[in-house]
Structures are given as structure tokens and as C-alpha cells.
Amino acid sequence: MDAVLPTLAIRLVIMAFAVFSVVVFRPDVLPPDPWLDIWNRWDAPHFLEIAAFGYGPPADPARIVLFPLYPLTIAVGAFVMAPLVSAMLVSLVAGLVAAAGLHRLVRLDDSRPAARSAVVAMAIFPTAYAFVAPYSESLFVALAIWSFVRAREGDWRSAGLLGALAAFTRIQGIFLLPALAIEYWLARRRLDRDAAWVAVVGVGLVAYLAVNYVTFGDPTYFVRVQRDTFHVVNVAPWETLGTLWGNVRSSKIGESWVTVYLAPLAAFAILAAASIWTVLSRRSRPSYAVYSIISLVAFASLAWPISVPRYMLGVFPIFLAMGAALRRPVGPAIAAGSVLLLGMFVSLFAIGHWAF
């Protein structure tokens, strides 16, 4: 209950705040069912499209950049309910499962108040609205966290299978493989037969490549789509950060300056700080550090890191670091700042503006 009830209450507050935001700022775009329809923005319709048609015609081939597991769960739910309701329900349930997993993971090393703080940190993170929206973030972070939980508890088969599902949900899931390998070595100090379950994490990515091959005849078709359609390529991290810094300094201040340039740069700073925390804190573990640092380098290698503030939600050690900070004297200020930013991004998303 320490995890589920606060998370559910905050989710309901976010949903109500989103409706009020549209009523106050853009009543002209208020849909017939505001509680659900205002969340059907940006990537959400694309997930619904995949759930309805798969990746082939009449779906847009560019949808292949979105991994299959989340739309698959939507499609299953759509047998008994409207697709948007199914998508929102999957996000809600997965978010609660993620909160329960985070609480359990923290309790393996720390106190109950520390676990509650981490859960609250996840619920009020500035981009936590993506846990409410029909996005894959809730499902991914639930699978990633529980993969670590089962690894910490010595159930390597479950850890590997959950990790594989995570890698079938977002490409970040493959980062679990080296992290879980570190966790396995620390637990055993030798390679036993069950070590093979860690490698199962890679099956999720292989399955996604197989979907690419079966649908388009090319296992790396999604790479071409990222490059040609979305202009996303990999570059040296310092190039990405240098470009962002230059744009922050030279671009005209306004909404796009905040969401397109400043927010991704701030996201990198926060993720870097959290990565340092995972290395230095006695409440962290080497596996958390490996997962965080690989994520940081991978995100910083994106030439167009416009969605990094949202991608950060999958790097759960951020919530451990933020939860620890919330219990310090500066905690109220951090919480206030996070809630205010969350409110701003919820409003932007609800009225149809870009919010990662």
C-alpha cells in the first residue's frame, strides 16, 4: 500500500489537472471525453495504429520505430474494450506494478521511508505524465524494475524473461543485459548454469529484429526509418551536448526554447548527477551504475535528443537518487520544483503542444 495508493492518488490528480488545464488554457480543443481523449496525443495514436493493424499496410511503415510489446497488450485489451481505454488501463496497471517493484527493490537495501520516498519521486518526476498517457514508459519501467528485483532475489530465470520483455518494449531494455550480468557476478562470483538466463534478455531485441525482417525484409529497417524519416542518427556524445548548449545560448527564448533545447540539456545534467550518485552512494549497486551510465551515453549519442526528458523515466536509479534527496533538508524544494515542472508539462501535453 505504501507504493500503490500514493501512486494511484497522484495519477488521479494528474488526470484531473490535465482536464482543468485544457478548460483554462484551451477550452476550444476540449474533446467530448476529456478524461481520456486529451491523452491521445503524439505517439499515442501511433501505438493505437500498430495495435489495430500491426506494422504493415495500412499502417504507416514509420511506426516500426515503436517496439511491439505495448501495442500488443493494447490489442489484447481491445477485444473487450475500446483501444484507447485499453491503452490507458495498461499504462495505469503497469505504473502501479512499477511502483510496487520500486518499493520492493529499495527495501532490499534500505528503510521503508526510503522506499516511500523513491515511489513518490517516480510519481512526481517532471515527465511522469508519460506514465499516465498511452505510452510504453509504464510498461517498460515495470518490466525493468521487476527484472532487477527478481535478480536481487536470485530468480535468474524470471529476471532474464522480464528483461527480454523489456527489450521487446523499448530498445533501452538491452541495457539490462550488462547490468544484470554484473549483478549475477556479484551474487555468485562464478558462472553457474543459470547464468544463461541473463543472456535471455537479448531475445527481446532479436524478436524485434525478426519483426523488422518479416514485415520489411530487413532486420535493421527501423534504423533506416530513424535516419530518413526522423533524422535520428548516432553521433559522439560531446557533439550532441555541444549542439544543445549552442542552441540554448543562441535560440529565441520561448516555449520551444524550453521544450526542444533547455529541457533535454537539463535532462542530461540530471541523468549525469544520478549516474554519479549510483557510483558513490552506499545505497546504490554497481549494476545500477552500469545501467544508468550506459543509458546516459546512449541518449547523449542521439543527434536529435528531443525526447530524452521522457526516456529518462526508464532509468529507474534516478528515482532512487531523487528519493534520497527528498529526505534531505533540500527535499521540499526539490519536490516543489518537480511538481511545478510536472504541472507545466502536463498542461502542454494536454493542450496538444510538444512535451517530449
Image: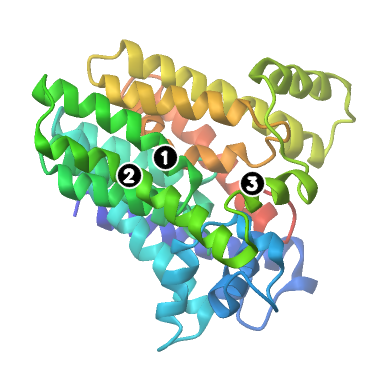
Question: In the image, which disc is placed on residue 246?
Answer: none
Structural crowding at the residue carrying mark 3, measured as other residues with C-alpha within 10 Å and reported as few (<14), some (14–19) or many (≥20):
some
Callout 1, which amino acid? Ile
Question: Can residue 113 be seen by looking at this rendering?
Answer: yes
Structural crowding at the residue carrying mark 2, measured as other residues with C-alpha within 10 Å and reported as few (<14), some (14–19) or many (≥20):
many
The reply to whether callout 3 and callout 1 are in contact (CB within 8 Å) is no
Q: Position of residue 147 (x, y in %)?
A: 26, 44
Q: Residue at x 9, y 31 (%)?
A: 192
Q: Residue at x 42, y 26 (%)?
A: 292
Which coloring applies here? rainbow
Residue under numbered circle 2: 201
User: Vertically, is 28 above or below 341?
Assistant: below
- The residue tagged with tag 2: helix, strand or loop? helix
Tag nearer the camera, 3 or 1: 1
Q: Residue furthest front?
A: 217
- The residue tagged with tag 3: helix, strand or loop? helix
Tag nearer the camera, 2 or 3: 2
Residue under numbered circle 3: 344
> Which label's residue is closer to the chain start, 3 or 1?
1
- The residue tagged with tag 1: helix, strand or loop? helix
The reply to whether callout 1 and callout 2 are in contact (CB within 8 Å) is yes
Callout 3, which amino acid? Met
Question: Can residue 21 be seen by looking at this rendering?
Answer: no
Q: CA distance from mark 3 to mark 1?
A: 32 Å
Residue under numbered circle 1: 174
Structural crowding at the residue carrying mark 1, measured as other residues with C-alpha within 10 Å and reported as few (<14), some (14–19) or many (≥20):
many
Query: Of 118 and 56, which appears nearest the observer?
Result: 56
